[in-house]
Image (cartoon, grey):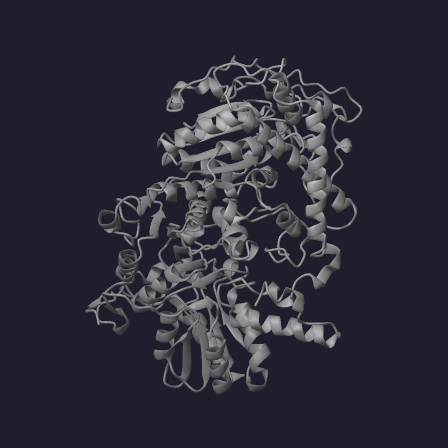
Amino acid sequence: MSAVKSMSMIQAINSALDVVMARDEMVTVMGEDVGFFGGVFRATAGLQAKYGKNRVFDTPITECGIIGVAIGMGAYGLRPVPEIQFADYIYPALDQLVSEAARMRYRSAGEFTCPMTVRSPFGGGIFGGQTHSQSPEGIFTHCSGIKTVIPSTPYDAKGLLIAAIEDNDPVIFFEPKRLYNGPFHGHYDRPTSSWAGHASAEVPEGYYRIDLGKAATVREGADLTILTYGTMVHVVATTIAELDPAEAVDAEIIDLRTLVPLDIEAIEASVKKTGRCLIVHEATRTSGFGAELAALVQERCFGHLEAPILRVTGFDTPYPHALEWAYFPGPVRIREAVAKIMKD
Amino acid sequence: MTAEPLSNRPKLALHVPEPPARPGEQADFRKHTLPAPGETPFIAPETAASAMRDHAYGLVRVLGDDHTAQGGWNPSLSPETLRVMLHDMALTRAFDDRMFRAQRQGKTSFYMKCRGEEAVAVAAAHALDDGDMCFPSYRQQGLLIARGHDMTDMMNQIFSNHADRLMGRQLPIMYSVRSKGFFSVSGNLTTQYPQAVGWAMASAARGGHNIAATWCGEGSTAEGDFHSACTFASVYRAPVVLNVVNNQWAISSFSGFAGGDETTFAARGVGYGIASLRVDGNDALAVYAATKWAAERARGNHGPTMIEHFTYRAEGHSTSDDPSAYRSAEEASLWPLGDPIARLRDHLIALGEWDMDAHTAQDKALTEQVRLANKAAEANGVLGDGLTNQPLETMFEGVFEHMPWHLAEQEAQMLAEWKAAGLPVVLAHNAELHP
């Protein structure tokens, strides 16, 4: 058992990289500003000094190149962990991700694989405007051959990242940057808080894994299942906790943690127990991952449902800057949806 | 500020490139300047890229019109090596002819020949070490032939039959042959370029000894991946050979649509500070010499090389297009740099190391060798056998290392619908491949 330390999500991610790089000399970290500087969010701080420039290096500003090069490194035998500085910048790499990385094992019948984990900060709530706030997970969950993982706590971030890097298939690892330095409860007008003192910020300094494909039950409840992930886990939990006693709902909150492969058993068990299902994500609504969740729940739990499945999401507009908090699916939108679903 | 009425200015005009000749017109290659053999001088492989920019605008040539090898780039290969290269090029052509016919006979869906470009792949394979990793496009089948890969295995892939190691998943000719250092071919263009650079960077980072080589067509140098790869290759001095096969045509679009009217493709490398050579791609000795030069440069940690192979796609892009619909029919026969096989053959004959009888006999033997390989492949089935070629379950295998529940469910659904239709769900003949 290694010592446990209070860590922010950024520190936990840094620790995961450190631990896995020490264990496996094939693990190679690359990306814009990740080397000497240690990343714009400090996720890779100190790694170049510790592991050298052959294993941690800065790259040119071409996401297509970063991912293409990482695929080639994977074919050589390395275990690349490229960083895309913001998820909003990932689109130039889409062809390399969707047509190459995701299909390498399949198209070569296993002759070549792509054991790559793409780390990328995603989501809004930081006044990042339309180019530093997006949640493009639905693009990747829609394509075959790639896994999508999204942590919501420092403990999960480290365990899931280690499992992702050790996975022999390509993984998109989206880090909710609003949570890097503290949990966010959805109240933009209240002071920010840090991770200090949170149980989920107590992180072992050594090696541990959280298997991909396993959801976590954040709050057990009997009346309503809420499926969510990333930043919204905290927003949902706080909103439910702060409901007026008259409106209080015994909600079961499930943090999906991995979108592909999805923990369908946990979802089914919960919805069959509660009979109601609300889906909450920050990404835009149309064709978002919530649509897939709603379809799955409807297909599998229809006989148990006592109300229509509802979705709380970002709106189908570009992520606005000045109007960020009118866009963000915060406590008001969640409360309205909870009230409606409980009334039906 | 506008000083004069806009109406006084000439109207802007959009330039849309047009090839020198369309169907029914006289083929015209006057726009190409072709230096004589020896005119583009040999330089040391460690020469700084900044000191050899003229080479991107010259043309490395060895074989002259008189069939002799000339100038500083002459690799001075033994007659034995020359005969092996000639053999491999002729075998590649025989393979192509047979597979083109197989497609026309309905035995597969698609084929792509490399007629006229055999030297580009075959001579490169001979100049590289067998352990060097190749990231080809879809027209470098000559690499596999030259590395001695089993032609029946290639044909099994083309027929998507039950012996196809790729389980019928890939379009014909999108081979993957790891044992021969031949990376899985993608149908998306130039994606292999940054991948090759990444492989080369990994080899360097790990202190390895093998280099990477990659190929794309002149048309797809327009892809962003090409430019990303060049930036990475230059920045990290990656031990990689970046080949641009300028065969003048990208399906029906001539090289002008990739910028070929304005400069050479080798000149793309100059802007990145990459050593760049423009080579007569129909001259096996020049291709060999340039590739050897680039490999030596890479092995000495002097960085990447871009090689433009100036050649001509003598036939259609694939079995799916008819070149007589978009270009002059005489172009292939009038191409000023000739045919790569005929040129190497004539060189060997000029050396007194080969004759027409031997050549005719060899062609006959190669045709027979390909026929036998084809027979063996057809015994494993052809695409027309359809759904009996692969066990249905293989559709779901290998999407991930371990099959997740949603794929398992979809597989069960497919097997159930197959069963409901009264069709066989498991095919024993392939059981040994997929235990």
Residue A91 visible in the shown view: yes
Residue A321 visible in the shown view: no
Q: In the picture shown, does residue A48 fall above or below A141?
A: above
- Towards the viewer: B328 or A108: A108
Which quarter of the rendered picture does the C terminus of chain B lie within?
A: bottom right
Query: At 58% across and 73% down in the image, what residue appears?
Result: B409
Q: In the picture shown, does residue B63 fall above or below A44?
A: above
Question: Based on the displayed image, in which of its 4 quarters is residue A177 positioned?
Answer: bottom left
Residue B32 lies left or right of residue B215; in this view the side is right
Count every numbered label the image shows and give the total. 0
Query: At 53% across and 35% down in the image, what residue appears?
Result: B125
Residue A217 lies left or right of residue A147; in this view the side is left
Q: In the rendering, at what x and y percent does residue B47 appear?
A: 38, 22
Q: In the picture shown, does residue A60 fall above or below A212?
A: above
Question: Based on the displayed image, in which of its 4 quarters is residue B146 positioned?
Answer: top right
Query: At 28% across and 62% down in the image, what residue appears?
Result: A12
Q: In the rendering, at what x and y percent does residue B163 appear?
A: 64, 57
Q: In the rendering, at what x and y percent does residue B305 appear?
A: 45, 29
Question: Based on the displayed image, in which of its 4 quarters is residue B338 positioned?
Answer: top right
Q: In the rendering, at what x and y percent does residue B6 appear?
A: 59, 21
- Towards the viewer: A13 or A124: A13
